[in-house]
Structure formats: C-alpha cells, structure tokens
Image: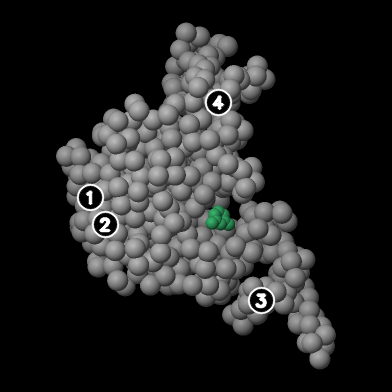
Amino acid sequence: MYNELKEVIAVRMVDLIEKKKQGQVHSDEEIKFIINGYCQDRIPDYQMSAWMMAVCFNGLNQEETFYLTDAMLHSGQIMDLSGIEGIKVDKHSTGGVGDKTSLVLGPMIAACGVKVAKMSGRGLGHTGGTLDKLESIPGFQVEMDQEHFIRQVNDIGLAIIGQSDQLVLADKKMYALRDVSATVDSIPLIASSIMSKKLASGCDTIFLDVKYGDGAFMKTKEDARRLAKTMITIGKAFHKDTRASLSNMNQPLGCAIGNSLEVIEAIDTLQGKGPKDLMELCLISGSHMLVQAKVVSSLEEGRALLMEKVRCKEALSKLKAMVAYQHGNVHLIDHPDQWIKAPYCIDIYPQMTGWCQDIKTKDLGTLVMKLGGGRQTKQDIIDPSVGIIVHKKVGDQCTQEEALCTVYASSLLEESMIDDIRQAWIMSTLPVMPILSVEEVLQ
Ligand code: URA
C-alpha cells in the first residue's frame, strides 16, 4: 500500500517536472503539492533539483511566484509580533561585501521612535552576515526566545537576533539543495526565498536593498531591477508596504571588511564620522522606512530627522542600549580603540600611479574569508579581528606612496596573497568617476 502510494506521488512529481520543462504554468495546488511533498520527504532531492532546474530555465510567472512564496511561508512558524506596540519595520539586504547597514540603520530608525524587530543571518562565502558582526562584540547574544525579543523591542525599540530554526522550513531544505545543484541564480527562486522569510518574520513594512555588481548575487542592474520588482509585487500581494533600492556593489560598502572592523566602522558612522557612501545608503533607505512607518510625511523630513538623531547621538545610544540588553560589552562601543586587534597589520601599495577604475569586490570578500573572517563551510569558526580597511575607492587618485588598503591578519601574509589583494584594484591612467551607492528606489 505504502509503495503504491509512493509510486503515485512519484509519477505526479515527474509530470510536474515535465510540465515546467515544457514551460507550462503550474496551479496553486501543484505548487503546494511540490513544497509540502518536499518538506515531508515524499519528494526526493533529485526530483526537487530537477524541478528547480526547470524553473531556472523556464521561470515562474507572477501568480506562480506568489503561490510558491505562500507555500514556503506556511511551511514553518510565522512570528506573531502583535505584542509589539506600533508599526514594525524591517529591512533586508541581498548581501554584499562590507555591508554593515543594519548595525547603523537599526539604531537610527529606533532613535526616531519606530520599532525594529529584526532577524538576521550569518555570512557564507564572500558575503558577511550581521549576526557574525554582532557576535564580534564580546558577550553579545543573538539567540533569544520570542517573549524576550518582544519585551526588548517594546522597551528600547530595537533587537537584532538570529532567525528561528522553525521559520520557513522549505527554504532551509531548498536553499541547501540549490547550493549544490547550480539552481541559486533564478529570480523567482531568490524572490520567494527572501520574501517568504521576510513575511514569516512578522513585520508590517519591508525595505529591500537589492545589490548588483561584482560583489553581489545579481551581476547586472537589469537583473537587480527584475528581482526588486518581483519582490515588491509579492510584498504588495501580501498587503505589506514593500520598497526596494538598487545599489552598486562594484566596490565594498564603506571601507571596512571583516567583523570587528565593520562594527567599529558602524560606531564611527553613528558618531557622524563614517564613510559617506554608507551614511548615504542609510539616509536613503531610512527615510523611506520612516515614510513607510508613517512617522514622517516626506523623504526630506525623514532624512532631516535621521541626521538629527545621529547629530545628537541618540542613534548611538540606541546601539548601546541594544548591546547592553543582549549582554555585549558596552564599554567597547564608547572606546573603539580598545577592541582586540589582529597581530599583523600590513599596508598594500599599488604598482602604478593612476585612478582606481574598479575593485574586484567579490575577490576582496573571498580574501577576507580566507584570512579567517568568514566561513567556507557552516562549521568554520570565525576570527573576528581580521579583515581589510580599504583606503582607495573607485574614482580615487592613487600614488605609489599611498596604501590601497591595510590588511589585518593573524599571521604574516604570503607574497601570493599580497599580490592577489593588490590585483583587486584595477587602475586607469585617466580620471574615473566615483560610483553612487544607491541608484534608485522602486516602490
Ligand atoms: N538570499 C536568500 O535568502 N535566498 C536566496 O535565494 C538568495 C539570497
């Protein structure tokens, strides 16, 4: 009887793979059948990867992408944040190099009186993760039960914790399979993966930072725009105010890459002394988030309020309050000079004078991972002190007397590694225009 049942199910899944292979459209029931069957181990990995490969080639239309997101969303727990008073805003970045936006933007938004109840992830490969950055603050706890999470957000307006294992179970299985079956780079699969998690985390509004370029998932602005539009359409279908920025990842965001170096840069930024591109990204996304939360009526008003909260140090106080609540060492927020430094600090100089035309951002992210600042596999242990401080960004004039970057390492660097780092800077003999961090915001 059991074997007969398995056969019926297997035949149907085969039919559905065939259907998508032929470019035909799935119904809501068919998509539910696939996701539920896969989560309950009735559909094996080999069939699921064949179906996802068919999706990579033939896509999903808007309705199918909505059905997929809905089925994934209901595959696990959905957070109930109704215990938090007021509008809860959320932001998500599609991942990049040197992206410490959440550490700056979360406190800025909370200082404006809007609730930030954020669940973040860890880094893998060349991109960093907010949780790893926060854990570089000695003592900082990212694990918290729902009751404490809600209490903290009600008390201080801000909490950043690890995503519960119970959220969107389908994504956990599917993402692991996509990683090993070359099915990551499909817009409907990425959009449903991100949006199911955002919707499950229970916030009222969503701001997405969709990155494109060498250091990002999406290599071109056109693909980033398609991904952003797909996610906005899904958000709206679920009655959430959803907006998305398109931002350039053809150079690292800010100057610091590496966990504790990035936290220190976030502190500098909240003290009004951070890199311009990072602050600009925070002001653009933050002003949209304040409009979404209805605490201001225009983007200009939002920007002015955010700048004031940085100027009067209320945003920095929010970061300190969060660190204190989550058992981190607050003293280090006031004294960034007292963080444990990597034992080796090496300046890398260019071999020619000129202008920085391009930075191989993905390579820099990978190099920081190899220094010990990131994970190649989920089990790897991170060294929070290592990383790179970039001194020359696209458009900057470079001379042989000025370092391109400073590397913080736990041991001396081999010549080949120094060479690899230097090669990440592509030089031009002619002046080059700097690049804007945010190109546009879609809604
Ligand atoms: N981030 C996600 O959460 N899912 C994807 O598919 C890609 C990036």
Q: Residue at x 64, y 73 (%)?
A: 39
Say what secondary structure mark 4 lies in: loop
C-alpha separation, residue under disc 1 versus residue under disc 4:
37 Å
Three-letter amino acid code of the residue under disc 4: Ser
Three-letter amino acid code of the residue under disc 1: Ala
Up/down of 37 relative to 275, above or below: below
Of labels 2 and 1, the one closer to you: 2
Say what secondary structure mark 1 lies in: helix
Q: Closer to the N terminus: mark 2 or mark 1? A: 1
Determine whether, in the image, residue 306 is placed left or right of residue 399: left
Q: Closer to the N terminus: mark 3 or mark 4? A: 3
Of labels 1 and 4, the one closer to you: 4
Badge 1 is on which residue? 111
Q: Closer to the N terminus: mark 1 or mark 4? A: 1
Report if the CB atoms under discs 1 and 4 are less than 8 Å apart: no
Residue 157 - label? 2
C-alpha separation, residue under disc 3 versus residue under disc 4:
45 Å
Report if the CB atoms under discs 2 and 1 are less than 8 Å apart: yes
